[in-house]
């Protein structure tokens, strides 16, 4: 069987391999397949459980406290409603998509595909290919696991001042976050693509679909992939130009994201601005230095390393450098994986906002740094997707 590596573009013949063992690319050492004999049933069970628990995680109370007759509670969507009401519609929409809407879509599509493959008779229907492609694309954008870390930090900030209880929605959110990680780990993507069907197009296998890695003859370029319906391109069109533009915009916004306050605390009429670095300082001086370290790494370190890393990758691909290809491919995989975790600080505010409202005495508001920060995360995630790592290997091939 022919397998294409999505990271370096090498098309290689796979050995039969025993179940339970992984297959690695002969060229860039990336994982080609993780064979798991019961993978599909496990993934189906985990995906259905996640979808089911998303309802209580969204509908029930996340955090709750009552002090001196004042009751405050926070749900997953209530921070979004506050951001909207305070005049940050873009921030509200993106957080709502990442934390509420896309998780339902991702696990709804995944469950539908896996259920059809498990219980359907005959050949899988045509919609399963595009549905699984979208489920996989939404994987990095459905951020319940990242939201949980943000909620945990928000909980720590409030709990240091007043007694907060974790509500039933909070426990459901914890379960959803762990199930999300387990689903990702148990999913044998190649096996699912194979089960969806590999129509043999005939002819030599020269190129591969960039979405489902189906090996196709060169004549298939520019037409929809027979399996996942994405338009097939030997390399992502305009990859380096688009990635350069997105990284440039990311650099421009990185400074305001760190310079401008993410939120403003109003206490007895006095305003106190809250930048990322100031939040880290407060956490460290209050003795929560491990959390401070997490926030510093996720919010300041990772976005900057991502921008510098992507700059190096784009520059070396443009110049056709043949050095350190395996290292650069590993760096690319790391950047694509880790980028989403930068969002924790924005999510902390989303949890924090609805709890910290006491009429005119104490209030917290989102500020201009928050949308700038979110934009850096989103732009660099799109840049990582636009960049085609196979372009780096083309230099070595020619
Ligand atoms: Zn490879
Ligand atoms: Zn495809």
Image: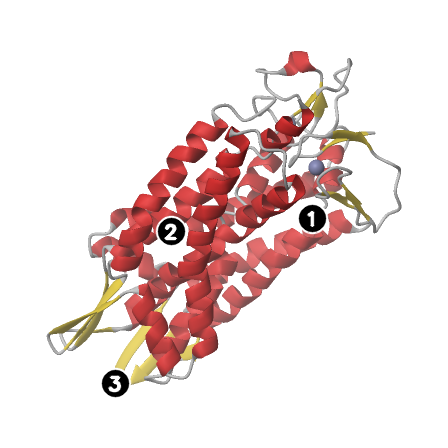
Considering the numbered disc 3 on the image, is that residue within a helix, a strand or a loop? loop
Q: Which mark is residue 96?
A: 2
Tell me whether circle 2 and circle 1 mark residues in contact (CB < 8 Å).
no
Q: Which residue is mark 3?
A: 69
Q: Which residue is mark 1?
A: 187
Does 310 sit left or right of 50 as displayed? left
Q: Nearer the viewer, mark 2 or mark 3?
A: 2
Percent across and percent down for residue 225 are 63, 22
Percent across and percent down for residue 58 are 44, 59
Residue 97 lies, with reference to residue 52, above or below; the image says above
> Along the line of sight, which residue is nearer the eye, 336 or 270?
336
Residue at the image position 46 percent from the left and 56 percent from the top: 302
Residue at the image position 65 percent from the left and 58 percent from the top: 182
Considering the numbered disc 2 on the image, is that residue within a helix, a strand or a loop? helix
* Image quarter of residue 122: top right
Residue at the image position 75 percent from the left and 22 percent from the top: 199
Number of residues whose C-alpha sits closer than 10 Å to that of mark 2, classed few (under 14), some (14–19) or many (20 or more)? some
Question: Label 1, label 3: how many angstroms apart (C-alpha)?
Answer: 48 Å
Question: Label 2, label 3: how many angstroms apart (C-alpha)?
Answer: 31 Å
Residue 118 lies, with reference to residue 170, above or below; the image says above
């Amino acid at each position: 069987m022919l397998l294409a590596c999505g990271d370096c573009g090498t098309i290689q013949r796979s050995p039969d391999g025993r179940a339970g063992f992984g297959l690695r690319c002969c060229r860039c050492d990336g994982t080609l397949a993780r064979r798991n004999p019961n993978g599909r049933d496990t993934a189906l069970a985990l995906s259905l459980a996640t979808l089911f628990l998303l309802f209580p995680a969204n509908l029930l109370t996340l955090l709750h406290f009552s002090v001196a007759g004042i009751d405050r509670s926070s749900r997953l969507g209530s921070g979004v409603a506050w951001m909207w009401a305070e005049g940050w519609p873009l921030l509200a929409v993106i957080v709502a998509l990442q934390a509420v809407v896309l998780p339902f879509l991702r696990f709804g599509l995944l469950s539908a595909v896996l259920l059809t493959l498990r219980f359907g008779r005959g050949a899988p229907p045509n919609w399963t290919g595009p549905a699984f492609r979208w489920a996989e694309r939404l994987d990095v954008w459905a951020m319940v696991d990242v939201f949980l870390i943000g909620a945990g930090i928000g909980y720590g900030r409030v709990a240091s001042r007043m007694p907060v209880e974790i509500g039933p929605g909070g426990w459901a959110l914890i379960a959803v976050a762990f199930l999300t990680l387990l689903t990702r780990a148990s999913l044998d993507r190649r096996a699912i693509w194979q089960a969806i069907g590999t129509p043999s197009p005939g002819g030599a296998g020269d190129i591969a679909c960039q979405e489902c890695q189906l090996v196709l003859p060169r004549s298939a370029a520019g037409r929809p992939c027979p399996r996942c319906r994405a338009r097939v391109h030997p390399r992502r069109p305009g990859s380096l130009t688009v990635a350069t533009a997105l990284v440039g915009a990311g650099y421009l916004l990185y400074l305001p994201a760190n310079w401008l306050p993410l939120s403003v605390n109003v206490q007895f009429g006095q305003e106190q601005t809250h930048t990322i670095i100031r939040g880290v300082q407060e956490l460290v001086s209050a003795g929560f230095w491990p959390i401070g370290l997490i926030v510093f790494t996720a919010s300041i370190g990772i976005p900057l390393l991502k921008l510098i890393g992507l700059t190096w990758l784009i520059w070396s691909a443009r110049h056709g450098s043949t050095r350190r290809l395996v290292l650069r491919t590993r760096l690319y995989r790391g950047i694509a994986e880790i980028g989403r975790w930068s969002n924790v600080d924005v999510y902390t505010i989303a949890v924090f906002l609805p709890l910290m409202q006491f009429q005119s005495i104490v209030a917290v508001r989102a500020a201009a740094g928050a949308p700038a920060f979110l934009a850096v995360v989103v732009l660099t995630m799109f840049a990582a997707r636009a960049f085609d790592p196979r372009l780096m290997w083309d230099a070595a091939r020619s």
